[in-house]
Amino acid sequence: MKGFDESFPKASGEDPELSYKMHKAGKKLVFNPKAVVYHVHPDSVWKYFRTKFYRAFYRILLYDKHRDKIAKDSYTPIGIKVQILAGYTGVALLFLMPTLYFYGFDLLASTILFGNAVLVLLATIYTLLSAVRTRHDPWAAIFSLFMIQVRTLAFMLGLFAGFIRHKVSK
């Protein structure tokens, strides 16, 4: 087993890829509370969006190498995967709704739209309450609602672009 996979064009994906390889090789990863690591974090919404976009973009390469980690890994919380799936579902609904209305399925379209609105409202309330409980700062909680949407959109677009790029380049 070698170290970091240098086939990732940007610094994005090689850390979890190394941990996946180590796990498959029977190696044990341990937490060292004395370790000090410094990271530079994005200092603007646009830089944050770009960072998340490229993480998702190269995640396609990572999951192509480790297909067993697509549905379940310890690196990506299930909540983020659900948000991305819900985002793709929402986009699909944008295209489906006019078609349903056009063909006279008004009640079905209205029911789906209402259900989707309720889910979005509940998710928003849950996120806001979670943010207030964890941060004890209402402004941070409100801002986190916006940033969660930014992150989800970046992940959705990055995964889509990465999938297209990866499939086209094969």
Image (cartoon, grey):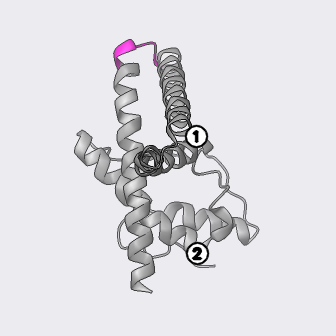
Range of the magenta residues?
135-139
- Given residues 141 and 22, the one toward you in this image is 141
x 57%, y 44%: residue: 82
Depicted 109 relative to depicted 1: above or below: above
Q: Is mark 2 on a helix, strand or loop?
A: helix
- Given residues 31 and 104, the one toward you in this image is 104
Q: Residue placed farthest to the front in the image?
A: 104
Mark 1 to mark 2: distance in Å?
Answer: 23 Å
The answer to which quarter of the image holds residue 143 is: top left
Is 96 in the magenta?
A: no
Mark in the foreground, 1 or 2: 1
Badge count: 2
Disc 2: which residue: 65
Q: Residue placed farthest to the right in the image?
A: 26
Label 1 CA crowd tier, 10 Å (few <14, some 14–19, many 20+): few
Depicted 150 relative to depicted 26: above or below: above
x 56%, y 68%: residue: 63
- Which amino acid lies under the numbered mark 2 shown in the image of this protein? Lys
Depicted 151 relative to depicted 120: above or below: below
x 56%, y 74%: residue: 64
Instruction: Point out residue 119 in the picture as x, y percentages from the top left corner.
Output: 55, 30
Report the magenta stretch's main SS: helix
Disc 1: which residue: 79
Is 136 in the magenta?
A: yes
Q: Residue 11 carries which label?
A: none
- Which amino acid lies under the numbered mark 1 shown in the image of this protein? Gly
Depicted 123 relative to depicted 34: above or below: above
User: Horizontal placement of 63 versus 153: left or right?
Assistant: right
x 45%, y 87%: residue: 170
Specify whether residue 43 is in view: no
Instruction: Point out residue 10 in the picture as x, y percentages from the top left corner.
Output: 35, 67
